Image: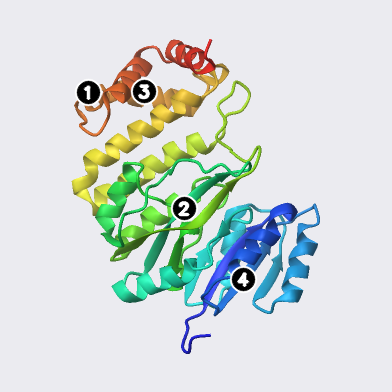
Amino acid sequence: MERGQDLISVIVPVYNIKEYLGRCVDSILAQTWENLEILLVDDGSTDGTDRLADELAGKDARIRVFHKENGGSSSARNLGIREARGKYLGFVDSDDFIEPYMYEKLYRAIRETGMPVAQGGRREIEESGNILPDICVPPERRTVYEGERFMRELLLHRGDCSFCTKLTDASLFEDREFPEGKLNEDFHVLVRMLPEIEGIVSIPDRTYNVFYKSGSNTRTDSAEKFSRVYGDNVDNADMVAEIVKQHYPGLVRTVKRFGLYQRLDYLLHIPIREMKKQNGQYRDIVRYLRKNRGEILRNPELTGKQKLYLMLFSVMPVLIRKVHRFIKSGR
């Protein structure tokens, strides 16, 4: 171990993931940055994952295990944050795995630039082994993004809000937790954090591997399933609009586009049976589009196709949803 290495705490929420937990933990133990601890937070597993976590801890002193009642990923992360001893925090989802040089490269980027957060690229992998297209394209060379620039990247759906791809100074979580009971909780935390920090350094290396196992995608477009992530994303859009108004007035047009986009995404996925006046969020979204038709037409950061869909949804939402579902079905 290199003399004077800072301790990195890697927090892994664990729930009914027995099949993949060993691979995840092995990838963290294999890090070239040796001075780390792994906090496995068992969130009330019922399939034997809890026992496996204890077995793994018995094989390596760097692993600590915490058992708690089921409360969700944010709840497990928050417990890990409270128990972490490291100067820096990393987060890994228990079905994913990381490259052996991930934390060393992120740590070096932090130390060499003075930024409190570093992030790497990610690789999206299907269960079959097929590599999916990048959701967020990493920069060609190491790049420092000051807060407003990184916020703009997030609002244009080009930035990566996941804390799993990042190494973060633990002091940033001293009075901060992930919101429990919410989806897209990383976005919620990051956009509140950005105005408080100098910036984020991003490296070109794809250091984090996101594993898509069968049935793991919560964003399912079907007549029977509608993930609440779409509704949470609309709420997040309103939340970040207030942050931008206060801290980044130059991004007001960009955050307006973000709110319209999130509402369009909601309307493109909501089951038709839920498009009723009794559905308060659906009703408010349609009213919002009707009130902001002028912004839809004038916003330079919306594409022509997005403008067309938004205008049509503001006039006849149920019909347009039916047409869209028909087109998607290929019939």
Of labels 3 and 4, the one closer to you: 4
The residue tagged with tag 3: helix, strand or loop?
helix
Task: Estimate the spatial distance between the alpha carbons at disc 3 and disc 1, rounded to whole Å.
Answer: 16 Å
Where in the figure is residue 274, as x and y percent of width and height?
A: 55, 21
Q: Which dot marks residue 297?
A: 1
Q: Amino acid at mark 4?
A: Leu
Q: Rate crowding at label 4 as few (under 14), some (14 to 19) or many (20 or more) other CA atoms within 10 Å.
A: some
Res 129 quadrant in image:
top right
Whichever of callouts 2 and 3 sits on the residue coming sooner in the sequence is: 2
The residue wearing badge 2 is 122
The residue tagged with tag 2: helix, strand or loop?
strand
Whichever of callouts 1 and 4 sits on the residue coming sooner in the sequence is: 4
Task: Estimate the spatial distance between the alpha carbons at disc 1 and disc 2, rounded to whole Å.
Answer: 35 Å
Of labels 3 and 1, the one closer to you: 1
Where in the figure is residue 136, as x and y percent of width and height?
A: 40, 47
Residue at 47% x, 81% y is: 6
C-beta proximity under 8 Å, tags 4 and 2: no
Task: Estimate the spatial distance between the alpha carbons at disc 2 and disc 3, rounded to whole Å.
Answer: 38 Å
The residue tagged with tag 1: helix, strand or loop?
helix
The residue wearing badge 4 is 29
Residue at 58% x, 38% y is: 218
Q: Amino acid at mark 2?
A: Arg
C-beta proximity under 8 Å, tags 1 and 2: no
Whichever of callouts 3 and 4 sits on the residue coming sooner in the sequence is: 4
Of labels 1 and 2, the one closer to you: 2
The residue tagged with tag 4: helix, strand or loop?
helix
Task: Estimate the spatial distance between the alpha carbons at disc 1 and disc 4, rounded to whole Å.
Answer: 52 Å
Of labels 2 and 3, the one closer to you: 2
